[in-house]
Image: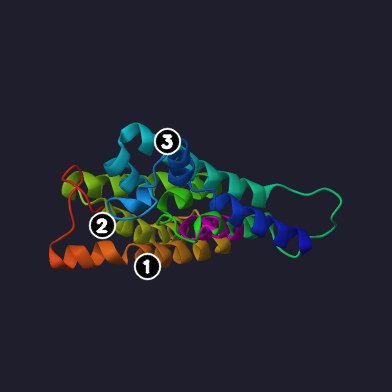
Amino acid sequence: MVVVLAKLLLAYLLGSLSGSLLIGRVRGIDIRQSGSGNAGGTNALRVAGWRFALGVVVIDVGKGALAAWLGLYPIAGMGAAPFTPIEVAAACALAAVIGHCWPVFFGFRGGKGAGTAVGAVLVLAPLLAGLVFLLWLAIVASTRFVGLATVVAGLGFPLFTWLAGYLGHPQPGAIFAFSLAIALLIVFTHRGNLLRLWRGQEPRLGAGSQP
């Protein structure tokens, strides 16, 4: 159990390594002072350009993948574990996403968690990650609302997980629980986007500030 708790703590700390804020320190900027004030990839794109945003995405997706791998990685000589590797990996993935949203290294002001969640799902269930990405891409292409696309894709994650089981490819219960937690978290972190959509104030991709 101590090993599991240590993995969860390390996963949270990994998640707290915000890509935009780390690169921003090298560049001498804090994107939380501009645009939406969010430390995620979309705000990075609008505030600092695509090269900056690409680096942010690589770091944020990568740390989600690394956190999930950390959960799966066996620790030799520790005896029987109270949880299965996939359960620990899903918990570590969620810890990393929470760390991204509320990073201990940056005053608990981070991003919205989508990129880190995608990285984790690429390790835990790559087919589901592909389906979620295709749904996100379709919504972005048809509406140019990145926030809306992320919320729809987040809600689609547990739906795809359930459908996989219905079609004869059941996913572990830990993956379904993780998908539900991510869906709720994505809706929560994008509540500002949803409110602006309701008010008709949400900008489309490529149309200015306030992502």
Image coordinates of residue 137 in percent, x first then y, are 28, 44
Please identify the residue farthest to the left as the structure is shown: 200
How packed is label 3: few (under 14 Cα within 10 Å), some, or many (20 or more)? few
Secondary-structure class at tag 3: helix
Residue 190 in the figure: left or right of residue 92: left
Image label count: 3
Between the C-alphas of marks 2 and 1, the distance is 12 Å
Res 27 label:
3
Quickly name the residue at label 1. Answer: 188
Q: Name the one closer to the observer, 178 or 105.
A: 105
Say whether disc 2 or disc 3 marks the residue closer to the N-terminus: 3
Q: Is residue 130 above or below residue 5?
A: above
Mark 1 lies on a secondary structure that is helix
Q: Is residue 118 magenta?
A: no
For the residue marked with disc 2, what is the amino acid?
A: Leu
Tag 1–tag 3 contact (CB < 8 Å): no
Mark 1 neighbour class, 10 Å CA radius: few under 14, some 14 to 19, many 20 or more: some
Residue 2 image offset from top left, x and y in percent: 77, 63
